[in-house]
Structure formats: structure tokens, C-alpha cells
């Protein structure tokens, strides 16, 4: 099956603060030094410079939990990308009107992470145990946010990390399949990077149980991100996100982790450190070759190689 190339994206970590404590979270870097983005001239200058240099049409706002940022609407409305998405755990209640306001400001897609269908399993994932009542409310809020965002006219996708067993993920899929009958949204299964081999086996078991057939395959330009779409005999559709070992030689060539690294170069991330905006090229290391100010990055060998890779892949 031919693999299609989708446009590259810039990931922006708008805050390091999160209202969940998922045990498998790799936090996309060192959260101790990450500040919250401010919708000011310095921030928009850094984003615009990266978007223009690499012709990026997509901006993905991540965290932490971006929806708890008090200035999220101002951040979104100040961006000029064609497609803006927000990735959320969905446990903060957000009304249809609030989602509509973000859509009017420029938001195109919301990605909600729903990893469990039962309160007990939801708590199993948390390192900070807050009780079954909280877990029950959180699950209901997640589903309510899927409905509200969909009704607000946003493109919605639900991400489910297969972190425990294939039964855990199948329970989520069956819950979402019922919800999908009345509201339009995508469903994507993700690997648990902390237990990759087992997670991949569980995803294959899910595909086998559902008798799902592959219908399409996509790779995001400039990253190791691969999406495969499936359809079951009943017409239920979902996708899986996997990665292949994709290297940016300026940072990966001499890396001691190269032979064991799961994904290699994942793409560009922008985050705030020490009152400036920095580009992160790797979530597993903290050296100056993978974390530098955006101005330093644009002058670096890595920026030149990244631009060449994008040009080659999108020809």
C-alpha cells in the first residue's frame, strides 16, 4: 500500500502545568524548566520565523494541559497557521460555547486523550490517586468535551494510549463506537513508549479481534510519525500511530542512544525557557545540540538539514 506524505507541523508546548499525573507520560522534555507561553510579540515572532522558514501549515498546541492556560484564546487568535490544533486530556469541563469561541479564534481541531473507560482503570494510570468519584467525573467530562467540541464545529480526534492490555483499549473503543454513532470524530490508538513491545502486541491483538483491515497509510513529513487507518467488517474505523527510526544526522549521528532509540527525530517543538523561546529537537536529551533558542536553531546545521529533508520528502 502506497504511503502518503502529510504536511509537517510545529508543536508548541504552551505550558508545563498539567491537571493529570499519567504514569506513562514522557512530558516531551524537562518540565522543571518549562515556562508558560505568553501571547506577546516575542512569542509570535519566534513562531512566525519557524513557520516561514520551513513552510509549516500546521501548529499543534500541547502541554502539560493547554486548556488550563488562561490566555489560550489569545494564543490561538494570534497564530497565522492554516491549521491549529489543541491536544487535551479533556478532564476540564469546557462548554460548547467555549469551544466555539476557540474555533472562531482560529482553532481547527481538538485532540482529546481518553485512555480508560472505567474509573478503576483511570485511577490505575494516575500517580496521584484522587478517588473513584473524581475518576468517574473525569471520564464523563472527557466524553462531554468530545460531544461539545464536535457540536461546536471542530474536527475532533480521540487518542488512546494502549498502555495496559488490549482489553483496556477495546473497552475504550467500544465506548467510543457508541458515542460515534451520534457525533463525528476520529479515533487513534497510540503506543505506550514506556512499554513499547507489549503495547505493539496489544494493538495487533485489537486489530485481530476486530478483524480490521488496513485502508490507508500516512507519514508526517519531517518526523517519525506514521498513521495507519483501519476499517472493521461493521464499518467501524480507527487508526494507529506508530513510529519508525527517522534520524536527523546532525543530532542523531553520534548519539549513544541511536541503536536503541524508538523514534529518532520526532519533529520541531517550541517551548519557553528563561524568558525566551527555545526549539527542542529531542525529548530524551538536554544538551545544547538538541535544545537552543529559536534564533540559534535557525543558524544551525540542524535547521539546514531539516529544511533539506522537508524539501526532499514533499517533492
Image (cartoon, rainbow, N blue to C red):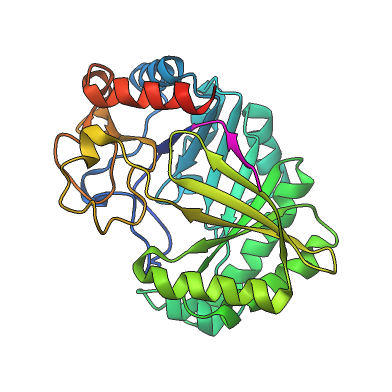
In the rendered structure, does residue 3 fall within the stretch colored magenta?
yes
Number of numbered discs: 0
Is 164 placed left or right of 216 in the picture?
left
Give the percent coordinates (x, y) of residue 300.
Answer: 22, 21
Residue at the front extreme of this rendering: 1
In the image shown, does 299 or 150 lie closer to the viewer?
Answer: 299
Is 205 placed left or right of 192 in the picture?
right
Could you tell me if residue 291 is visible in this image? no
Q: Residue at x 15, y 42 (%)?
A: 254
Give the percent coordinates (x, y) of residue 127.
Answer: 35, 74
Q: Residue at x 38, y 63 (%)?
A: 193
Is 311 placed left or right of 205 in the picture?
left
Q: Is residue 230 shown above or below 163?
A: above
Give the percent coordinates (x, y) of residue 53.
Answer: 40, 15
Is 50 placed left or right of 234 in the picture?
left
In the image shown, does 201 or 80 lie closer to the viewer?
Answer: 201
Q: Is residue 206 shown above or below 260?
A: below
Q: Which residue is drawn at 74% across and 56% down?
A: 147
Could you tell me if residue 193 is visible in this image? yes
Q: Is residue 87 shown above or below 81?
A: below
Q: Which residue is drawn at 63% across and 64% down?
A: 141
In the image shown, does 202 or 27 lie closer to the viewer?
Answer: 202
Which quadrant is the C terminus positioned in?
top right
In the image shown, does 292 or 275 lie closer to the viewer?
Answer: 292
In the rendered structure, does residue 224 fall within the stretch colored magenta?
no
Give the percent coordinates (x, y) of residue 26.
Answer: 33, 58
- Report the span colored magenta: 1-8
Amino acid at each position: 500500500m502506497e504511503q502518503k506524505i502529510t504536511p509537517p507541523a510545529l508543536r508548541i508546548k504552551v505550558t508545563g502545568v498539567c491537571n493529570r499525573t499519567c504514569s506513562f507520560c514522557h512530558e516531551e522534555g524537562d518540565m522543571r524548566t518549562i515556562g508558560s507561553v505568553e501571547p506577546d510579540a516575542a512569542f509570535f515572532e519566534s513562531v512566525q520565523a519557524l513557520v516561514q522558514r520551513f513552510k509549516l501549515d500546521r501548529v499543534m498546541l500541547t502541554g502539560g494541559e493547554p486548556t488550563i492556560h488562561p490566555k489560550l484564546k489569545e494564543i490561538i487568535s494570534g497564530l497565522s497557521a492554516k491549521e491549529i490544533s489543541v491536544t487535551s486530556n479533556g478532564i476540564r469541563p469546557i462548554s460548547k460555547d467555549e469551544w466555539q469561541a476557540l474555533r472562531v479564534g482560529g482553532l481547527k481541531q481538538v485532540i482529546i486523550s481518553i485512555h480508560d473507560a472505567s474509573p478503576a482503570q483511570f485511577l490505575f494510570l494516575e500517580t496521584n490517586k484522587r478517588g473513584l468519584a473524581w475518576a468517574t467525573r473525569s471520564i464523563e467530562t472527557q466524553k462531554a468535551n468530545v460531544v461539545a467540541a464536535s457540536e461546536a464545529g471542530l474536527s475532533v480526534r480521540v487518542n488512546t494510549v494502549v498502555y495496559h492490555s488490549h482489553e483496556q483499549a477495546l473497552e475504550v473503543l467500544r465506548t467510543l463506537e457508541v458515542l460515534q454513532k451520534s457525533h463525528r470524530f476520529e479515533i487513534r490508538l497510540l503506543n505506550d513508549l514506556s512499554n513499547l513491545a507489549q503495547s505493539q502486541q496489544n494493538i495487533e491483538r485489537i486489530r485481530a479481534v476486530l478483524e480490521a483491515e488496513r485502508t490507508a497509510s500516512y507519514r508526517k513529513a519531517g518526523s517519525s510519525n506514521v498513521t495507519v487507518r483501519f476499517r472493521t467488517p461493521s464499518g467501524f474505523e480507527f487508526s494507529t500511530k506508530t513510529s519508525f527510526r527517522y534520524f536527523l544526522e546532525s543530532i542523531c549521528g553520534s548519539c549513544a542512544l541511536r541503536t536503541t532509540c524508538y523514534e529518532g527525530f520526532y519533529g520541531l517543538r517550541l517551548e519557553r525557557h528563561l524568558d525566551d523561546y527555545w526549539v527542542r529537537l529531542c525529548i530524551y536529551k538536554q544538551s545544547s545540540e538538541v535544545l537552543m533558542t529559536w534564533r540559534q536553531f535557525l543558524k544551525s546545521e540542524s535547521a539546514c538539514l531539516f529544511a533539506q529533508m522537508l524539501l526532499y520528502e514533499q517533492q
